[in-house]
Image: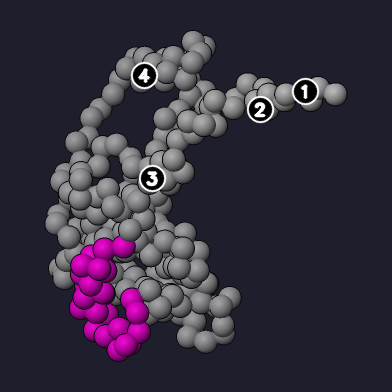
Amino acid sequence: MRQQQHQPATSTRPNAQLHAHRAPASLFKMPILQFGLRPGHLRIVAGKRDPEQELEAQQWIEAITGERFPPGVPYELALRDGIILCKLMNNLLPGSVPKINYTGGDYKFMDNINQFQKACIRYGVPDVDLFQTVDLFEQKNIAHVTMTIFAIGRTAYKHPEWKGPWLGPRPSEENKREWSEEQLRAGEGVIGLQAGQNKGATQAGQNFGATRKILLGK
């Protein structure tokens, strides 16, 4: 009996060739960097910690509160319970944190962080510059915590009653412009067209292209 010769099996999947040329996995792990930031800030967007900036933030807080960070305790753990941050805000804005929790476990310490965030907003820190509670308490993004401290430092320049010490350079003055109603309406139409429709601005159109920008100083 003649034996049939079998041809090597070939894949009939339409995307077999695509899998053969798949991009390396490392390509998808590259940090997404925002446009419009100076090169020195790119590492911040990527979430990388900067020991020098952490030391600056620590020394600034110590100078204001008059208290040293606990010796031998890492920066992120010294801040974790929120006590030091609450003391910072009470020095910048007296009474902004009426009750600091020194005991009580995780729930009370997270409450310290929440009170600190509210005090920052009252002081004038933009909410987009505030870190999330988990960034500090669960050590998710310590770089963001440091950025918030630098944002507080920038905001301090806007308070004439504050005489220092300072953190970071003085921010440039905001260029304020007055817009007429006609100009505002024309701008709304542009937003609507950019969002892919021509029936005026909508909430989706106003948020089109929005990005979270965080800068350490100007």
Give me the residue at 42% from left, 45% from top: 26
Hey, which quadrant is residue 123 in on the image? bottom left
Label 3 Cα crowd, 10 Å radius (few <14 / some 14-19 / many 20+): few
Q: Which residue is mark 2?
A: 8
What amino acid is found at the position of numbered circle 1 in the picture?
Gln
N-terminal of the pair, mark 4 or mark 1, is 1
Q: Secondary structure at mark 3?
A: loop
Q: Is residue 121 magenta?
A: no
Q: Is residue 69 magenta?
A: yes
Q: Position of residue 201 (x, y in %)?
A: 48, 20
Choose between 102 and 48: the one closer to the eye: 48
N-terminal of the pair, mark 4 or mark 2, is 2
Q: Which residue is mark 3?
A: 30
Q: Real-space Cα distance between discs 2 and 3? A: 39 Å
Q: Secondary structure at mark 2?
A: loop
What amino acid is found at the position of numbered circle 2 in the picture?
Pro
Quadrant of the drawing holding the N terminus: top right
Q: In the image, which is nearer the foreground, mark 3 or mark 1? A: 1
Q: Real-space Cα distance between discs 1 and 2? A: 13 Å
Q: Position of residue 72 (x, y in %)?
A: 32, 88
- The furthest residue to the front: 1
* Colour convention of the picture: one colour
N-terminal of the pair, mark 4 or mark 3, is 3
Q: Are marks 1 and 2 in contact (CB under 8 Å)?
A: no
Q: Which residue is mark 1?
A: 4
Q: Position of residue 52 (x, y in %)?
A: 20, 67
Magenta stretch in the rendered image: 49-75
Is 101 above or below relative to 197? below
Choose between 216 and 17: the one closer to the eye: 17
Q: Are marks 3 and 1 in contact (CB under 8 Å)?
A: no
Choose between 80 and 61: the one closer to the eye: 80
Q: Which residue is mark 4?
A: 187
